[in-house]
Image (cartoon, rainbow, N blue to C red):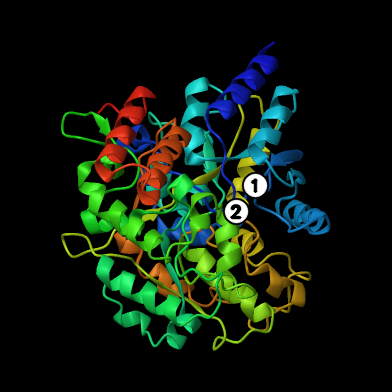
Amino acid sequence: MKKRRVMSLLAAALMVCSISACGKQESASTKASQTEGSKTEESKTNESKTEAVSQPDKEAGGSVKIMTANTGGKDEAEMKLFAEALSKATGLTVEFEKPASDYDKVLMQKLSGGEIYDLIYITASQYANLVAQGALMDITDRVNGSEILTGNVDPAEWKDITIDGKIYAGFNKKEIHRVVALNNALLKKAGIDYKKIEPTMDGYYDVMKKLKDSSQDPDFYPFDSILSETYDLQPWMAAAGLKNGVVLDDSGKRFAPYSEDGAAPVWEWFKKLYDDGLLDPSSFVDKTKDMRAKMGASSQKTALTVDWAAWVGLHNANAKAGGISPEDFEIVSLPGLKNPDGSYMLVKGSASLFAVPANAKNPDGAIKVLEYFATQEGGNLLSTGISGYDYTGTEGTFELTETGAQHGNDHGAPFPIYKDFKPIFGFNPGVDEALSYSSYATIDRIIPNEADYKEIVGKWGIKIIKGEVSTQDGLSGMRKELVDRKVTDR
């Protein structure tokens, strides 16, 4: 009965909050960030401890069953090799399940059907819901008792996932931030030096106009966005000084800054871009995979998007693997529009996690896997991949195989959680520049009904951009629906 109840709780929570795929990581709960840090913080800064322990404790054994969305091999054959490599490194028998698509739906079905896992991949937005349901195991003592987990992971990371002093998961990877990505080859063709772009709405409008005028392709649009999911408007809404998502006012009431009257100038700027043929009309229906395909070297149907810093490098790595030179394709990055204070505003991703279900058979083995992920060697596996398959050689003489080059140093964690991680081959081209904007990035406040927020803001925003409603009526409608559906209080 207990197992059945746990499965029901997990499945119910999964229905409440959809799990996102690669790169759609959400914020750890505000409740978590407001609570005092657990004992974890007291011992994490001990550098000698960090240096002394580089491999997980060999005492735990047995088998570990993992449900994963992104981590692992790129296909079934490599997934098997990945599991074998992880098994050899940890002394465990590791079994992975990685659905080809619809991860959240498949996981819900598996859990409802009575499947038992030792680790399940979840996003931070789902983490709080599962904790509230009692569906995850409290692993606080195990984390505090691990020299690797306390020594190799930044204390701030643990603080972000601590809820009421307790921890229920470890990390898949270190989350970074989204930036404005630009096709530098197309910018140069249009006579634009990206480092001299004026960080204002007028400045970016002029850039997009020049890009459009320099292209002979009728299907080319300078700017593509994911408006139906409001992904990601933060670099543009910064012009009005507005934070993404739902925030609290001084009285503790929830509100959505993008629905406030102060957002009107930015929504009207989007409308102007659309009216003048600079915003891709497909932005109203595109998903991230569509946007990335258009931005890629083989398409180049758009020149300006907002995406994760890792994707700046992945676009460049994919082009290099395809034999395309930087003169013909290069993605660079900028932090967007300046806010009224003269700074920038970007969204930092929150934790993507491997949680231990309350009915896990081998929680000690699960901890051992989490420990390995928090080492240099584990980071190598999660990023570059499998020795002998994705890369060959020894320290100082490593070389990517043809397969490894195609995989772009990403097997679920382009930025591993180990705080002192050093990539074997360095980061992909363009990533260092994108990472330089990290000081402008902040985590969004987690809300349990994030999907409702995105749907409502996206729907009314699109109506404004298309001219189906006036800006004021659109913002008023947006606020009303957010309140009616209990996303906000005002």
Quarter occupied by residue 197: bottom left
Residue lying farthest top? Answer: 1
Q: Secondary structure at mark 2?
A: helix
| Percent coordinates x, y for residue 273 in the rendering | 37, 62
| Percent coordinates x, y for residue 216 in the rendering | 53, 80
Pick the front one: 328 or 268 = 268
The three-letter amino acid code for the residue at tag 1 is: Val
The quadrant the C terminus occupies is top left
Q: Residue at x 48, y 40 (%)?
A: 124
Packing grade of label 2 (10 A; few <14, some 14-19, many >=20) is: many
- Number of labels in the image equals 2
Q: Residue at x 23, y 28 (%)?
A: 253
Give the CA distance from mark 2 to mark 1. Answer: 6 Å
Q: Is residue 431 left or right of residue 405?
A: left
Q: Is residue 195 left or right of residue 15?
A: left
Q: Secondary structure at mark 1?
A: helix
| Percent coordinates x, y for residue 163 in the rendering | 40, 32
Eyeballing the image, is 324 above or below 172?
below
2 and 1 marks in contact (CB < 8 Å): yes
Q: Residue at x 44, y 87 (%)?
A: 188
Q: Which mark is residue 107?
A: none
Eyeballing the image, is 62 above or below 439?
above
The three-letter amino acid code for the residue at tag 2 is: Phe
Is there any visible trace of residue 155 in the rendered image? no
| Percent coordinates x, y for residue 104 in the rendering | 63, 36
Q: Is residue 48 left or right of residue 488?
A: right
Pick the front one: 208 or 370 = 208
| Residue ID for mark 2 | 373
Is there any visible trace of residue 451 in the rendered image? yes
| Residue ID for mark 1 | 369
Pick the front one: 272 or 126 = 272
Eyeballing the image, is 300 above or below 91?
below
